Image (spheres, helix red, strand yellow):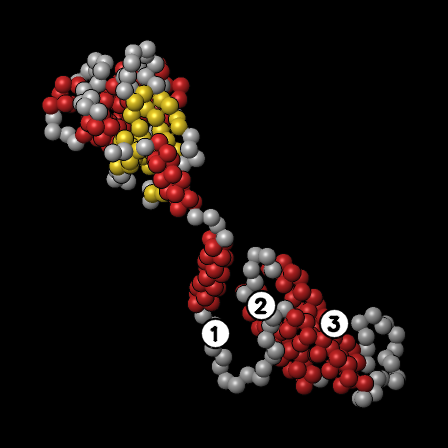
Amino acid sequence: MEQLQAKHRQEHRDLQARVTQRKKSATKKTRKGINDECTKLESQLKERQDLELAQLTGQTGSDTGPPDTNPPSNEDEPAQEKMNGDEIEDRLQSLGMPPSQPKSGQTRKPNRQKARLARRAAEHEHMADQAAKEAQNLPDLRQQEINAMRTHFVSRGLNEYEMRSDGHCLYAAIADQLAAQNHGLRPKISLSGMDKILESSKSSYKITRSVTAAYIQEHADDFLPFLEEPLDQYVGKIRDTGEWGGHLELLALAKAYDVTINVLQGNGQIEKIASGTDDEKSTLWLSYYRHSFGLGEHYNSLRPAG
């Protein structure tokens, strides 16, 4: 009896060790299936051990009558143990658990942190490989846009003057256009504080930023329906930061300088932004890129070729 109990305790420890190891290595997707399978294996082991105890003592868990006078022969018992043991080993190996091994001295505990880091590194490497494969199949939008723009420049007789990609490109391109057409940086309409701004030693793009902010500030009703933040905060970003400019800022500049602004895009479309007056006015040309510059959207200045 003691020998059988010692055997059962060893089987229980071995199974618990392997079940614990498997549960620790489970992922969110496999955790439920592994838990269910481990519970089943533990139940099967308990049933087999109970049967072995009953056979040894000549009783079964459900039999209340006298002990069986014809206990099973010794030839059948090893076969039963071998069959159940193999079944458990097969189930454990199907879950990816290593087969049981005899202990030789103190076993070394696995380093959980290193195992987690190794799994994460493998996952990241797999994701990087997948992204690289997908990128190989994507079109080169940057080069396509540059090639299309060059074709449009030739057909329209324009040369491009590149602005720095620093958030000020729209304002710098407008300043370049005004200088190329001898307009100067003073707006055509009266805006408060312009004399002080123009007399300062600011860069030209800072002056066009200030003109834009002043126009929007003094004509708030035309812009408030399109703003997603308070007016003072919005014009402060235009005047004092490197915040990008877009359609609203181009509209303010067209009205402040009484010019028409043509924005040429990679698909050949021209967005025309007019001042809204009937006077004959100059036309400023900008090129607009979506994919070709590091910060994203970008504006350059266009001048007649030759």
The residues tagged by marks 1 and 2 sit, at their Cα atoms, a distance apart of 14 Å
Depth order, front residue of 57/40 = 40
Of labels 1 and 3, the one closer to you: 1
Q: Earlier in the sequence, mark 1 or mark 2?
A: 2
The residue at 35%/31% (across/down) is: 156
Indicate the quadrant containing the N terminus: top left, top right, bottom left or bottom right.
bottom right
Q: In this rendering, would 109 be left or right of 250?
A: right
The residue at 36%/40% (across/down) is: 150
Of labels 2 and 3, the one closer to you: 2
Q: Position of residue 259 (x, y in %)?
A: 29, 19
Q: In this rendering, would 185 be left or right of 295?
A: left
The residues tagged by marks 2 and 3 sit, at their Cα atoms, a distance apart of 22 Å
Please tell me whether mark 3 sits on a helix, a strand or a loop.
helix
Q: Determine which residue is flagged by label 3.
A: 47
**Three-letter amino acid code at the position of disc 2:** Arg
The residue at 35%/36% (across/down) is: 154
Q: Determine which residue is flagged by label 2.
A: 22
Q: Earlier in the sequence, mark 2 or mark 3?
A: 2
Q: Determine which residue is flagged by label 1.
A: 109
Of labels 1 and 2, the one closer to you: 2
Q: Position of residue 223 (x, y in %)?
A: 35, 19
